[in-house]
Image: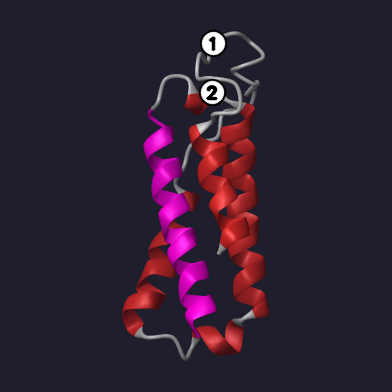
Amino acid sequence: MSELYNQVRYFHYISHVLQGQQVDPICCKCKAFVNTVIRTEESIAEWESAHAGEIADLPGDIRLLLTEARSEIATIKRPENAEGQKKAGNCTMPEGVCFVKISKGIREKV
């Protein structure tokens, strides 16, 4: 059951990271941001489909986190012509550092 909890907690976490980054003047225009929003939305749907029976057994507070995550992701604005901001020379974060990609990478460890 703890694996299910951690997946839900991750979805809740990443949804808030993405909500925050959508107002960042550089991240909100980045292809990595848009791709992560899309992939997170797909991942939540796939995960819910694969665990439908188990989700019903989760405590209410954990199910609420999942509902909030799904809602947060659905409201994120997705620019149509996003481009890689590092490649465009707009993002000056050090090589290998991306707020969105680092946050997305946490899922692999959960």
Helix, strand or loop at disc 2? helix
Classified by dominant secondary structure, the portion drawn in magenta counts as: helix
**Residue 21 lies in the magenta stretch:** yes
Residue 37 placement (x, y as % from top left): 57, 44
Q: Residue at x 62, y 33 (%)?
A: 32
1 or 2: mark nearer the eye: 1
Q: What number is the disc on residue 43?
A: none
Q: Is residue 79 above or below residue 92?
A: below
Which residue is label 2 attached to?
29
Which contiguous range is marked in magenta? 1-23
Q: Which residue is mark 1?
A: 90
- SS under mark 1: loop
- The colour scheme applied to this rendered structure is secondary structure
Left or right placement of residue 20 versus residue 37 in this view: left
Among numbered discs 1 and 2, the one appearing first in the sequence? 2
Note whether 92 is above or below 21 in the view shown. above
Q: Are marks 1 and 2 in contact (CB under 8 Å)?
A: yes
Residue count near mark 1 (Cα–Cα under 10 Å), binned few <14, some 14–19, many ≥20? few
Q: Residue at x 43, y 33 (%)?
A: 22
Q: Residue at x 42, y 20 (%)?
A: 25
Residue closer to the observer: 100 or 68: 100
What's under tag 1, amino acid-wise? Asn
Q: How many marks?
A: 2
Q: Residue at x 56, y 34 (%)?
A: 33
In the displayed structure image, the side of residue 33 where residue 42 appears, left or right: right
Residue type marked 2: Lys
Q: Position of residue 49 (x, y in %)?
A: 65, 76
Q: Give above or below for 57 relative to 89.
A: below
